[in-house]
Image (cartoon, helix red, strand yellow):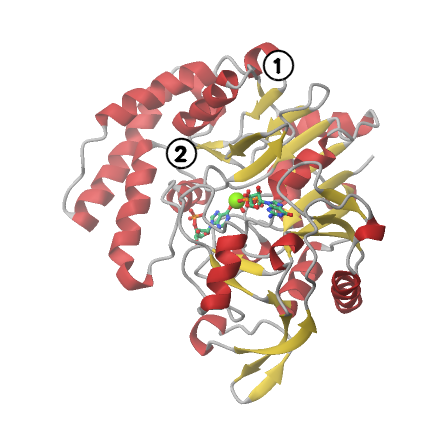
């Protein structure tokens, strides 16, 4: 058996949570492989809505196990809040026993959050637009070989190790920013949260995932963020701090590359981005505003308005190449209903040339999009349940994209609810 991977092909928020939930019943294990509480994965079913940050989106299925992988970074306070939210909604994970946590997942300390805030403040106008969840600083400590892992909480000298790292952080905060705000309350909450998390199975997840495969069980790796936010291939430095691509599933779970099965790439029928950085097909006019309003494009984590624009083919082709995408999912097609014309960015004008790829200097050169006009469709599609009900003009858009992207679109999402999903 191989591991299927599901990940975002744009700048995040493509609808990963919804689609993982739709597919979960067919898997034995859903495993998050990178990112942390910067993610906000929204699920809707039975009239209820949930936003998950660190917990995998298979959590609502009784026969599906969920794993927070070694590549994920955990803020204990945020994770316990999420666990409590689910408990109040009738899903007690300790009773259900359907959540495991990798011992090797790194911990976000209260001071990582302070460092994130301070570093963004220092950047001023050039700030990344981080979610301020401590992501950059915690991955810096991981690669700097200073980090603390959740498995370390059982070590007798855990508090000493914690103090050592905090001393380093406070010195940094002091020299860089002149003052260190009081974080004692958050520190208390941090240790209280760790106590609660220690009741969950802290496991050597690489062995578990591989033994699932050996037993012929089905595993789905759930990505966070999107390919264009990848630390290596995204619009650097306006990226997150992990590998959001298929390769990240290998390192973030301990799966050999040859064990990767289907790679399911998700994209919106248009494009959005939260935070700073280049966005060649961005719409800063009334049309962009209309997409934001109809698509309810406000961050699931920060509530910030998402920037909106037309679909970007050079970017999507790049993402498909990097990930080895074998199946596509298009979400939010319903949001474009009623537009007389829609547009697709097919190429860029860049340094006096027409190019069909994302250039290295995308941040400084600001390539201009070259747009192709496409007929829109007028029908409300949020209630359709069958391919036969797909309006002809939407079908033509789907066909055009499949031809350009050279991968089939397997599912079409026409609304936020689990049932609003059509298999093509
Ligand atoms: P994720 O981070 O990739 O899981 O995506 P988010 O949850 O941050 O953002 C996607 C938003 O779009 C959420 O509010 C979803 O409920 C919603 N959504 C997902 N698919 C569709 C769709 O096909 N149509 C509409 N209108 N909303 C959708
Ligand atoms: P999901 O999983 C959209 C963006 C931030 C910022 C940049 C760096 O819900 O798709 P970070 O906090 O990671 O240091 O921020 O990345 N970002 C996301 N944008 N969806 C996300 O996650 C994101 N996670 C981070 O807005 O531009
Ligand atoms: Mg999101």
Q: Quadrant of residue 215?
A: top right
Image location of residue 97, percent across then percent down = 62, 14
Q: Could you tell me how far apart the alpha carbons at marks 1 and 2 are, in whole angstroms?
A: 24 Å
Asked if 269 appears above or below 349 in the picture, the reply is above
> Which residue is located at x 49 percent, y 21 percent?
83
> Which residue is located at x 66 percent, y 76 percent?
373
Q: In this orientation, which residue lies closer to the viewer: 350 or 280? A: 280
Asked if 410 appears above or below 170 in the picture, the reply is below
- In this view, the residue farthest toward the bottom is 352
Residue 217's disc is none
Secondary structure of the residue carrying numbered label 1: loop
Residue annotated with mark 1: 97
Left or right, 150 with respect to 48, comes to left
Image location of residue 179, percent across then percent down = 15, 42
Residue annotated with mark 2: 108
Q: In this orientation, which residue lies closer to the viewer: 370 or 94? A: 370
Left or right, 9 with respect to 412, comes to left
Q: Answer yes or no: do the residues labelled 1 and 2 have beta carbons within 8 Å?
A: no
Q: Is residue 232 visible?
A: no
Q: Is residue 153 visible?
A: yes
N-term-proximal mark, 1 vs 2: 1
For ligand 2, tell me if the residue under mark 2 lies within 8 Å: no
Q: How many marks?
A: 2
Image location of residue 77, percent across then percent down = 39, 26
Q: Residues within 10 Å of mark 1 (few under 14, many from 20)?
A: few
């Amino acid at each position: 058996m191989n591991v299927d991977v599901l990940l975002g092909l744009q700048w995040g928020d493509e609808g990963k949570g919804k689609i993982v939930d739709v597919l979960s019943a067919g898997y034995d294990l859903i495993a998050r492989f990178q990112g942390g509480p910067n993610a906000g994965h929204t699920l809707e079913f039975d009239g209820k809505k949930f936003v998950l940050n660190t917990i995998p989106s298979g959590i609502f299925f009784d026969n599906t196990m969920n794993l927070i992988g070694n590549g994920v970074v955990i803020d204990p306070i945020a994770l316990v809040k999420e666990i409590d939210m689910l408990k109040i909604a009738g899903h007690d994970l300790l009773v259900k026993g359907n959540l495991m946590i990798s011992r090797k997942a790194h911990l976000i300390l209260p001071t990582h959050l302070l460092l994130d805030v301070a570093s963004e403040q220092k950047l001023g106008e050039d700030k990344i637009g981080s979610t301020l969840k401590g992501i950059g600083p915690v991955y810096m400590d991981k690669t700097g070989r200073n980090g603390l892992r959740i498995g370390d909480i059982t070590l007798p000298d855990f508090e000493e190790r914690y103090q050592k790292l905090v001393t380093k952080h406070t010195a940094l905060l002091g020299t860089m920013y002149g003052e260190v705000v009081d974080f004692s309350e958050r520190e208390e909450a941090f240790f209280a949260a760790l106590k609660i998390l220690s009741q969950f199975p802290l496991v050597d997840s690489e062995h578990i995932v591989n033994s699932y495969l050996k037993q012929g069980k089905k595993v789905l790796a759930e990505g966070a963020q999107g390919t264009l936010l990848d630390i290596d291939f995204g619009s650097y430095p306006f990226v997150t701090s992990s590998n959001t691509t298929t390769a990240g599933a290998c390192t973030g779970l301990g799966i050999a590359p040859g064990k990767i099965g289907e790679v399911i790439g998700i994209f919106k029928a248009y494009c959005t981005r939260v935070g700073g950085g280049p966005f060649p097909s961005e719409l800063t006019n009334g049309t962009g505003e209309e997409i934001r309003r109809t698509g309810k494009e406000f961050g699931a984590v920060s509530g910030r308005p998402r920037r909106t624009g037309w679909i970007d083919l050079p970017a999507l082709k790049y993402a498909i190449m990097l990930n080895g995408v074998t199946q596509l999912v298009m979400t939010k097609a319903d949001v474009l209903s009623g537009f007389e014309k829609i547009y697709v960015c097919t190429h860029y004008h860049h340094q006096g040339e027409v190019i069909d790829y994302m250039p290295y200097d995308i941040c400084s050169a600001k390539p201009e999009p070259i747009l192709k006009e496409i007929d829109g469709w007028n029908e409300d599609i949020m209630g359709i349940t069958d391919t036969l009900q797909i309006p002809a003009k939407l079908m033509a858009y789907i066909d055009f994209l499949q031809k350009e992207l050279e991968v089939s679109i397997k599912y079409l999402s026409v609304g936020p609810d689990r049932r609003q999903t059509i298999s093509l």
